[in-house]
Image: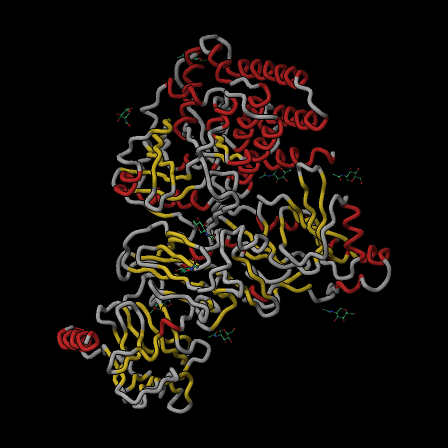
């Protein structure tokens, strides 16, 4: 009965809809009829017009029978959601989709061979219908579904389309090549939902994190119903207890879940037909962690505003000039080398032929020959030279054990370079090749491009009243500049996810909006609702006010309303998206933004464990924790400074802006805001506002010197000093405020006092040698960072180096 009713509705729609009148497409295909590849109008359209099915061109004179969203997206033309014959496209002439009288649906190539078939039989009349949900169904007259496209997904799921024990999503080969690729999203034999890389030579699972058990990853292996599905609202759940909500949870017009060609599973949404798809969730946030992405003997790195980048290891070259998935091979031409050289002969012979190239912060995952704890570098080198198939080794420092561990690698796979990784790779290469490389050769890949380097170039007018008044004004304008440019803000934080990293991926390049996890645009009303009308203030500063809010997906956020940001929308978006791409475990994470009329808001993760300032004032930190905080903060800043991002100077480093995560892992807050606030707009600045920042500001702010990242180094030095002495510099500055002393003298005096204090304190707090060691290095680092001459200060990566490797010196 329902079937007949449905049929009648379809019939009436067919009679009265403009689609049918134009006879451009059909609403169904009845037994005995066919769709032809030569006639582009030969398509089936769902009754709501949302989906179409027909021949889709996948290459030159190559077609697949497919289902797509009728309305193209501006960047993607048609969004295909299903294909019958992705690996065997048919000819552009004579090919047909035929619904035979016996109830079998077949696809023929050039009128001859059958490429694909539904393998169905029916002795009653059948009909092919494209439902409003995108499901192509072969129905009997009784309304029984003989076959449906939902039961054989390709790389995409639609809402309510189940992924089952019998189905998997297999990525396309690339964005333009629709044939089956290397990545699949499926239920494994232990009932767990996983992502598998199955490349030409190797295969490995990389999601959930392979080093965690299913249980640790929050998965259950006991429910063998093996079903995963997502709904229109954007929540995905699976029988292994995996579940997520998209960041834009709530009714959206269209959503798809896709196993993308780059190895990530993403949930996309769009609010209206024909709009651009926006990523609202993705499985892997650090896209360089996806296996096979750059192939063997290469590493993946993330370049801001460009995306993911693959590079061959020194001495290696791309195997296939256009496709990174084939990885890299030893360079041929004269220098061609073969690791088996070390198998013949003794280690002395190998030592004669091979040497090592040091690649800092490069990690290769898996394929270890073994694990050798507490090895010296020399011992690890000998070990690798003696192993005939050792291609290099990972050498990693375990800071709190004070030892180095050695991991010889038999294959170099899944390589990535990230400033957050504390280990190094030593690559085994013939000495002939080593000598042709300069020590810095590998760094050349990361030379800053002009486009990325945008140092803040700010000088202050030398005019105005003279004498002490002039000094006060200079100090005021300097600090005020710092204040307006780099905002004062306190907020408290938390994060449920420790290792969660966000990185932008190349998808952005291909026209999707932000691919980063959760990074998205919010509407003003949404944020108003989240903060219940902006009532709970958790921080206030020159740049804006911070409110606590609860997002619709139940995440607690710190929402900052900017006051000084009155630049245009496009400019604001450009800057915000750059900041949104910065990811480091020692930087606070930005989840999104809002730009609407005059409103400019930023949405950050909320940290509820408090700031360093609070912990210092309550004396709640031991030396080990202080050391970790110093190291983590330095790493976060080094990332900002070193990754060609000097324009994201922090400029407001102080204990209030260093927020604490679990395990005293610090996260630096409020970076990058200088670009969002209008620098010219200093009219509303008042001296009293400067208070929070005073004392942390480098001397060059009040001199007529260009501000560089070394200003941050100075402020960092003050923070370390404050950790050592427990005294806030603000107090000291206030004491001198009314005096006639020059700024320079004031600073020097103050620093010297602080230094004495630091040493005295260190003396009085003798712990074991271990602590003494760390204390000394902290004092040393602080002293160097506080050099008056900015060129005499170390840069942040040198600071990290000093802190981590001091016992080697
Ligand atoms: C979209 O279609 C236009 C015209 O058919 C074509 O020129 C363009 O290359 C297509 N773009 C993509 C990304 O396929
Ligand atoms: C797509 O990739 C497959 C598998 O690598 C390859 O055989 C095929 O030639 C490619 N097709 C196009 C149109 O490049
Ligand atoms: C298994 O998972 C399915 C789907 O999530 C759920 O409906 C069912 O209750 C689960 N079974 C058990 C025994 O937990
Ligand atoms: C599934 O997840 C819920 C919370 O998301 C948790 O309470 C429950 O214990 C989990 N079940 C299993 C079997 O892990
Ligand atoms: C390396 O040398 C071994 C033995 O000499 C040989 O079997 C192997 O094919 C060589 N490998 C390459 C890549 O040339
Ligand atoms: C590491 O090795 C050195 C020398 O071999 C030894 O003195 C030290 O105790 C070892 N450290 C640990 C933590 O095992
Ligand atoms: C590499 O080293 C050679 C000599 O060893 C030198 O001439 C050249 O300038 C160096 N190149 C770089 C980029 O440092
Ligand atoms: C400021 O001092 C300079 C010399 O240092 C002098 O030439 C100038 O006239 C003074 N300006 C005022 C306004 O006093
Ligand atoms: C930091 O200093 C080291 C050593 O002088 C140098 O190699 C590195 O390039 C510097 N980094 C930056 C961003 O200046
Ligand atoms: C200056 O600040 C006050 C309140 O702090 C505000 O009412 C006023 O609009 C601001 N003026 C400008 C130009 O931003």
Residue at image position (30%, 60%) is 254
Task: Report x, y in % for residue 83.
Answer: 39, 74
Looking at the figure, which quarter contains the N terminus? Answer: bottom left
Q: Nearer the viewer, residue 702 or 762?
A: 762
Q: Is residue 357 above or below residue 78?
A: above
Q: Is residue 178 above or below residue 474?
A: below
Q: How is the image coloured?
A: secondary structure
Q: Quadrant of ligand 6?
A: top right
Task: Report x, y in % for residue 393.
Answer: 71, 52
Q: In this image, 400 relative to 210: left or right?
A: right
Residue at image position (72%, 26%) is 769
Q: Is residue 562 above or below residue 226?
A: above
Q: In this image, 428 relative to 136: left or right?
A: right
Q: Nearer the viewer, residue 377 or 329?
A: 377
Looking at the figure, which quarter contains the C terminus? Answer: top right
Task: Report x, y in % for residue 357.
Answer: 71, 51
Task: Report x, y in % for residue 406.
Answer: 72, 48
Asked if residue 537 shows in the view, the reply is yes
Q: Is residue 446 above or below residue 753?
A: below
Asked if residue 20 shows in the view, the reply is no
Q: Nearer the viewer, residue 484 or 268?
A: 268
Residue at image position (36%, 68%) is 81
Q: How many marks?
A: 0
Q: Nearer the viewer, residue 3 or 439?
A: 3
């Amino acid at each position: 009965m329902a079937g007949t009713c449905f049929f009648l509705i379809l019939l009436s729609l067919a009679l009265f809809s403009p689609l049918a009148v134009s006879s451009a497409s059909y609403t169904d295909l009845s037994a005995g009829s066919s769709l032809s590849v030569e006639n582009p109008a030969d398509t089936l359209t769902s009754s709501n017009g949302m989906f179409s099915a027909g021949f889709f061109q996948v290459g030159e004179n190559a077609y697949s029978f497919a289902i797509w969203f009728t309305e193209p997206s501006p960047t993607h033309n048609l969004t295909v959601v299903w294909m019958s014959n992705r690996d065997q496209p048919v000819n552009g002439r004579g090919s047909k989709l035929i619904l035979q009288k016996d109830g079998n649906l077949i696809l023929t190539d050039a009128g001859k061979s059958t490429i694909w078939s539904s393998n169905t039989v029916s002795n009653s009349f059948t009909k092919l219908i494209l439902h409003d949900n995108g499901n192509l169904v072969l129905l009997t007259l009784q309304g029984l579904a003989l076959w449906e496209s939902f039961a054989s997904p390709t790389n995409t799921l639609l809402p309510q389309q189940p992924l089952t024990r019998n189905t998997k999503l297999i990525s396309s080969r690339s964005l333009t090549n629709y044939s089956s690729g290397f990545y699949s999203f499926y239920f494994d034999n232990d009932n767990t939902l996983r992502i598998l890389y199955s490349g030409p030579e190797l295969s490995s699972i990389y999601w959930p994190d392979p080093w965690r058990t299913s249980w640790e990853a929050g998965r259950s292996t006991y429910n063998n119903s093996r079903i995963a599905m997502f709904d229109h609202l954007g929540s995905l759940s699976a029988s292994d207890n995996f579940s997520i909500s998209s960041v834009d949870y709530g009714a959206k017009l269209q959503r798809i879940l896709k196993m993308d060609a780059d190895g990530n599973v993403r949930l996309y949404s769009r609010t209206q037909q024909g709009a651009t798809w926006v990523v609202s969730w993705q499985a892997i946030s650090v896209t360089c962690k996806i296996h096979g992405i750059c192939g063997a003997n290469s590493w993946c790195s993330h370049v801001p505003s460009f995306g993911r980048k693959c590079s061959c290891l020194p001495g290696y070259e791309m195997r296939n000039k256009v496709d990174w998935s084939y990885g890299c091979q030893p360079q041929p031409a004269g220098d061609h080398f073969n690791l088996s050289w070390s198998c013949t002969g003794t280690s002395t012979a190998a030592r004669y032929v091979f040497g090592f190239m040091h690649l800092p912060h490069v990690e290769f995952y898996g394929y270890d020959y073994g694990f050798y704890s507490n090895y010296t570098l020399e011992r690890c080198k000998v070990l690798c030279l003696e192993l005939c198939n050792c291609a290099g080794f990972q050498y990693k420092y375990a800071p709190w054990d004070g030892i180095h561990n050695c991991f010889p690698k038999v294959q170099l796979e899944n390589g990535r370079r990230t400033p957050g990784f504390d280990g190094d790779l030593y690559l085994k290469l013939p000495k002939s090749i080593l000598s042709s490389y300069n020590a810095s050769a590998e760094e050349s890949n990361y030379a800053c491009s002009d486009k990325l380097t945008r140092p803040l170039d700010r000088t202050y007018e030398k005019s105005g009243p003279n004498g002490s008044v002039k000094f006060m004004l200079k100090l005021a304008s300097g600090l005020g500049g710092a204040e307006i440019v780099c905002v004062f803000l306190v907020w408290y934080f938390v994060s449920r996810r420790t290792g969660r990293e966000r990185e932008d991926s190349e998808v952005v390049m291909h026209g999707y909006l932000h691919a980063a996890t959760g990074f998205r645009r919010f509407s003003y009303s949404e944020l108003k609702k989240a903060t219940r009308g902006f009532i709970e203030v958790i921080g206030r500063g020159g740049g804006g006010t911070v409110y606590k809010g609860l997002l619709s997906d139940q995440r607690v956020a710190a929402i900052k309303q900017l006051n000084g940001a009155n630049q245009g929308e496009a400019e604001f978006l450009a800057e915000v998206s750059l900041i949104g791409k910065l990811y480091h475990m020692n930087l606070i994470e930005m989840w999104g933004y809002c730009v609407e009329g005059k409103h400019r808001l930023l949405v950050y993760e909320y940290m509820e464990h408090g700031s360093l300032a609070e912990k210092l004032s309550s004396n709640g930190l031991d030396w080990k924790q202080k050391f970790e905080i110093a190291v983590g903060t330095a790493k976060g800043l080094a990332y900002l400074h070193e990754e060609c991002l000097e324009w994201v100077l922090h400029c407001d480093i102080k204990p209030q802006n260093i927020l604490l995560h679990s395990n005293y892992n610090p996260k630096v807050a409020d970076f990058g805001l200088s670009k969002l606030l209008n620098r010219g707009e200093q009219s509303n600045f008042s001296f009293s506002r400067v208070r929070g920042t005073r004392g942390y500001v480098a001397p060059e702010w009040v001199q007529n010197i260009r501000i560089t990242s070394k200003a941050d180094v100075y402020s960092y030095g003050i923070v370390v000093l404050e950790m050592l002495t427990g005294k806030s510099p603000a107090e000291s500055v206030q004491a001198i405020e009314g005096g006639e002393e020059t700024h320079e003298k004031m600073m020097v005096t103050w620093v010297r006092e602080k230094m004495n204090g630091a040493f005295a304190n260190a003396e009085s707090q003798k712990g074991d040698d271990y602590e003494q060691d760390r204390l000394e290095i902290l004092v040393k680092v602080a002293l160097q960072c506080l050099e008056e001459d900015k060129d005499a200060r170390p840069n942040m990566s040198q600071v990290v180096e000093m802190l981590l490797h001091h016992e080697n010196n």
